[in-house]
Image: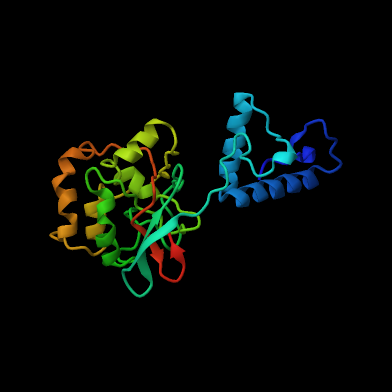
Amino acid sequence: MALEADRTLLSPEQPLDDEAEHDQRVRAHLARLANARGLSVDEVLEALNATLASGQPLITDPEHDGEAAPGLPSSRKGGTVTQQRPAGPVWGVTSVDCQGPPVAQRSPCAGTERCPWRRDAVPGAFPAEAFRLSAPTSYPDSDRRFGCHSSSAEAPRVCAGWLLRGASGNQQVLKLLEAGLIQVPTLPAGVELYDDYAEMAVANGVAEGDPTLAPILRGRSQMCADNETLPGGDVAAEGTQNRRSGGAG
């Protein structure tokens, strides 16, 4: 879907009979654009602002509807599920093969099901087996990514907490960050994260001596020894957590 020639939205010359009504049209149009591309409204606004700053036009020829609109990512197609492994009665781990640049969660999830990387998350909210199965996402030189539990196979996102603390050995992610193809997640004021995957997994019920954590423990000296925060990134999503009844995340 291209940006339609909706000049009531995009043209400052259009007289406005009712500013509140115009605002409603703007919000509705942004919501349609966001839904068509699997984006949030905030992401659409950021893309449009970047396009305006670069001097590119915002309106495309309606005859070319279906092409990516300038300044907006094209519609995100869901990834291909390659493996599903149960981790408990409700949660499991789904591996998803994604095409194109990955998308990162904007910040570690809050709410009732908080990101497991947050120190204020309830330990054991997710089964320990899920963290055993997903441990390879933080192995040195891994090419897998830890998916956000609140995303899905249809609209996969990389976990913000993992990007900030567990992705330092992932060369694909680092290259995407250097190229500016992944947005850096933000850490809200007052929120603290576990230092690495092993610490997070142990806090969520994995035994310290569990063999799935051994490569991470051996690589600790090479992974962010100074606890420096990584900019976030995502590659083809594998090792994502999901509700078995609700798709990949």
As drawn, is 200 to the left or to the right of 111?
left
Q: Residue furthest bottom?
A: 89
* Residue closer to the observer: 229 or 119: 229
Residue for point 57% across, 48% down: 40
Tell me where residue 112 appears, x and y as whole percent.
44, 63
* Residue closer to the observer: 28 or 82: 82
Quarter of the picture holding the C terminus? bottom left
As drawn, is 106 to the left or to the right of 162?
right
* Residue closer to the observer: 172 or 128: 172
As drawn, is 195 to the left or to the right of 185?
left
As drawn, is 221 to the left or to the right of 183?
left
Q: In this orientation, does residue 53 appear? A: yes
- Height in image: 184 above or below 82? above
Q: In this orientation, does residue 191 appear? A: no
Tell me where residue 208 appears, x and y as whole percent.
15, 59
Q: Residue furthest top?
A: 55
Report the label total: 0
> Which coloring applies here?
rainbow
The quarter holding residue 59 reads top right
- Height in image: 12 above or below 158? above
The quarter holding residue 85 reads bottom left
Quarter of the picture holding the N terminus? top right
Residue for point 30% across, 63% down: 130
- Height in image: 248 above or below 35? below
The quarter holding residue 15 reads top right
Tell me where residue 83 appears, x and y as whole percent.
35, 62
